[in-house]
């Protein structure tokens, strides 16, 4: 078991566990820690807690210190320098006529490395670009190709719902989203209606998917023939969100409705399924 605090390095970024040691570290504190990228500045997002070995990456690194005013100034200076580096790199990309789009630039806290995030349709030979950037900035240069979902997370924006993008505000990790989720929720399969700003399926399709899957397991499919206490009928309507299904009784010209609870308790048997 390990005593840890959760630290996030970017807004809506992944949470990493570190050993706080004897420091009085609390949620909301800015701290300096050592990572695989070097010395970094992060925000404590969870108070001390005990976790198992399977929840941490060993060896567990320690929190070096609580950030002071000098550290805050360093972070602000790094952000200003990153904007300047963005302008310079954009010009160099144009000069080298490279088919790539620069998305963001980030200095590590100790300025031992500058990371340039970019998108491109395929592989890009940026060796000459790296040489130019290294001669200008006199530090380690890393060009990291990212996907369109990561680009949306970095840049942010407003989704079709009118709210800020989930990925840029609170989603730590991207989860797989499939077209089947849209079908299960009876949503329009029009790509413009179920795609986010990144052009991929909206992350929010995942939020209620488990609930829909559980309901679909308990309820019959559309067009399925069932035997009810009122006679044989066919399922003509299915509202999974409200847990209501409609059954059209054969030869009677009427439709009966069941809630999910009523359906499970009623003597209804599936006798045929038509695809």
Image (spheres, rainbow, N blue to C red):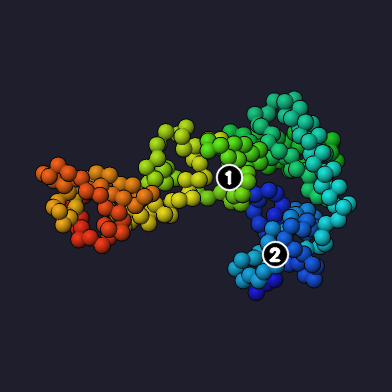
- Residue 216's place in the image compared with 88, above or below, is below
The image shows residue 243 at horizontal and vertical percentages of: 34, 52
Q: Is residue 61 left or right of residue 242?
A: right
**Which residue: 85% across, 43% down?**
77
The image shows residue 182 at horizontal and vertical percentages of: 41, 43
Q: Residue furthest left?
A: 251
Q: Is residue 151 left or right of residue 200?
A: right
**In the picture, residue 134 is in which quadrant?**
top right
Q: Element under label 2?
A: strand
Which quarter of the figure is the N terminus placed in? bottom right
Q: Which residue is mark 1?
A: 166
Which quarter of the figure is the C terminus placed in? top left
Task: Rate crowding at label 2 as few (under 14), some (14 to 19) or many (20 or more) other CA atoms within 10 Å.
Answer: some
**Which residue: 75% across, 63% down?**
26
**Which residue: 88% across, 52% down?**
70
The answer to which of 138 and 239 lies nearer the viewer is 239
Callout 1 touching callout 2 (CB < 8 Å): no
Instruction: Using the rendered image of the protein, determine whether residue 271 is visible from the camera's viewpoint.
Output: no
Q: Which residue is mark 2?
A: 47
Task: Rate crowding at label 1 as few (under 14), some (14 to 19) or many (20 or more) other CA atoms within 10 Å.
Answer: some
The answer to which of 175 and 182 lies nearer the viewer is 182
Badge number at residue 131: none
Instruction: Using the rendered image of the protein, determine whether residue 262 is visible from the camera's viewpoint.
Output: yes
The image shows a total of numbered marks equal to: 2
The image shows residue 130 at horizontal and vertical percentages of: 76, 37
**Which residue: 63% across, 44% down?**
168
Q: Disc 1 and disc 2: Cα gap in Å?
A: 24 Å
The image shows residue 6 at horizontal and vertical percentages of: 68, 61
Q: Element under label 1?
A: helix
The answer to which of 56 and 58 lies nearer the viewer is 56
**In the picture, residue 68 is in which quadrant?**
bottom right
């Amino acid at each position: 078991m390990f005593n840890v605090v959760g630290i996030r390095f970017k807004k809506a970024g992944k949470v990493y566990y570190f050993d706080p040691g004897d420091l009085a570290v609390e949620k909301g504190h800015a701290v300096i820690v050592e990572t695989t990228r070097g010395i970094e500045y992060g925000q404590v997002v969870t108070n001390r807690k005990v976790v198992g070995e399977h929840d941490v990456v060993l060896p567990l690194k320690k929190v070096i210190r609580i950030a002071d005013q000098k550290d805050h100034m360093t972070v602000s200076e790094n952000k200003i320098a990153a904007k300047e580096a963005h302008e310079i790199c954009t010009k160099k990309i144009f000069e080298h006529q490279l088919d790539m789009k620069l998305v963001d630039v980030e200095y590590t806290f100790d300025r031992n490395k500058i990371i340039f995030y970019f998108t491109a349709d395929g592989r890009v030979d940026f060796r000459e670009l790296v040489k130019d950037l290294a001669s200008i900035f006199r530090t380690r240069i890393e060009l990291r190709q990212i996907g369109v979902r990561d680009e949306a997370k970095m840049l942010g924006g407003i989704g079709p719902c009118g709210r800020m993008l989930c990925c840029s505000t609170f989603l730590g990790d991207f989860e797989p989203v499939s077209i089947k989720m849209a079908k299960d929720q009876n949503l329009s399969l029009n790509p413009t209606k179920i795609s986010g700003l990144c052009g991929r399926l909206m992350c929010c399709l995942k939020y209620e998917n488990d609930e829909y899957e559980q309901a679909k397991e308990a309820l019959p499919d559309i067009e399925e023939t069932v035997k009810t206490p009122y006679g044989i009928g066919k399922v003509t309507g299915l509202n999974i969100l409200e847990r209501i299904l409609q059954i059209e009784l054969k030869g009677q010209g009427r439709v009966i409705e069941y809630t999910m609870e009523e359906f499970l308790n009623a003597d209804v048997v599936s006798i045929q399924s038509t695809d």
